[in-house]
Amino acid sequence: GAVVSQHPSRVICKSGTSVKIECRSLDFQATTMFWYRQFPKKSLMLMATSNEGSKATYEQGVEKDKFLINHASLTLSTLTVTSAHPEDSSFYICSARSRASATYEQYFGPGTRLTVT
Amino acid sequence: GNSVTQMEGPVTLSEEAFLTINCTYTATGYPSLFWYVQYPGEGLQLLLKATKADDKGSNKGFEATYRKETTSFHLEKGSVQVSDSAVYFCALILNSGNTPLVFGKGTRLSVIA
């Protein structure tokens, strides 16, 4: 149980275009979803926290107009990278927290590698 | 604030060697502690966890004990395999409030045959 999927797993796009990444909790309801960014050989950097039906809370230094997060249902959150630039190339990982979890455990998706050319 | 400090890598070991990856934490409240593993090109997988003092988490031969007196959660394995090569992240979460995991910087382990 507690499976989180991400789509796509890899995406290559041209500079200036927008890319949408989907994160789904497959067998549980996620009250909260988190989006992380990971640079090569680095730790995870939390970008934002989203609760179903409300606006996302962005971490300091993350541009909310560039990284649009929507959490429309208890099983789906999307991250849209708008007007992508090569410096946005990175590994993006989502994580979901189960509504039923007493320990606030987070379950992670497999990640999406974005390459902007 | 809340933070996790883990030993700098990379760590390189021979197969069947003993592994220890140190992790200490600071927390304003009472945390649950986790070890996550990331294999090359993949997302994070939960390896083990402990939710209260003196709990021992274990999985796949890995163990870690929640030591409140030393604020530590060191990861150990008695005999590593090449397939254990990965990046290991120590993390905490406070047992109150809907806050995100706080991660350490990760320790890269390479096991050679």
Image (cartoon, coloured by chain):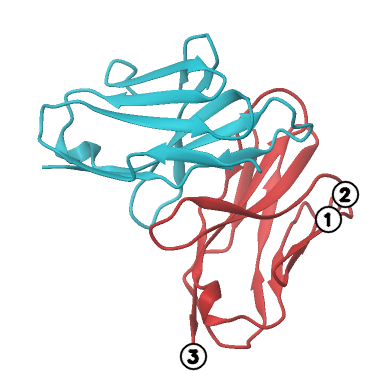
Against A33, is A43 above or below?
below
> What is the display colour for chain A?
cyan
Label 1 sits on what residue type?
Answer: Arg
Q: Are marks 1 and 2 in contact (CB under 8 Å)?
A: yes
Q: Mark 3 lies on which chain?
A: B
Q: CA–CA distance between discs 3 and 1?
A: 33 Å
Report the front residue among A33 and B68: A33
Residue drawn where x is 38% and y is 58% of the image: B41
Q: Going from the N terminus, do you reach mark 1 or mark 2 first?
A: 2
Q: Nearer the viewer, mark 3 or mark 2?
A: 3
Label 3 sits on what residue type?
Answer: Ala
- Picture coordinates of residue A17, whole percent (x, y): 13, 27
Q: Mark 2 points at which residue?
A: B53
Q: CA–CA distance between discs 3 and 2?
A: 36 Å
Against A98, is B108 above or below?
below
Q: Mark 3 points at which residue?
A: B113
Against A16, is A89 above or below?
below
Q: How crowded is mark 2: few (under 14 residues within 10 Å), some or many (20 or more)?
A: some
Q: Going from the N terminus, do you reach mark 3 or mark 1 first?
A: 1
- Picture coordinates of residue A8, whole percent (x, y): 32, 40
Image quarter where the N terminus of chain B lies is top right
Q: Residues within 10 Å of mark 3 (few under 14, many from 20)?
A: few
Q: Mark 1 points at which residue?
A: B67
Judge if badges 3 and 2 mark residues of a common chain: yes
> What is the display colour for chain B?
red
- Picture coordinates of residue B38, whole percent (x, y): 50, 58
Label 2 sits on what residue type?
Answer: Ala
Residue drawn where x is 20% and y is 39% of the image: A87
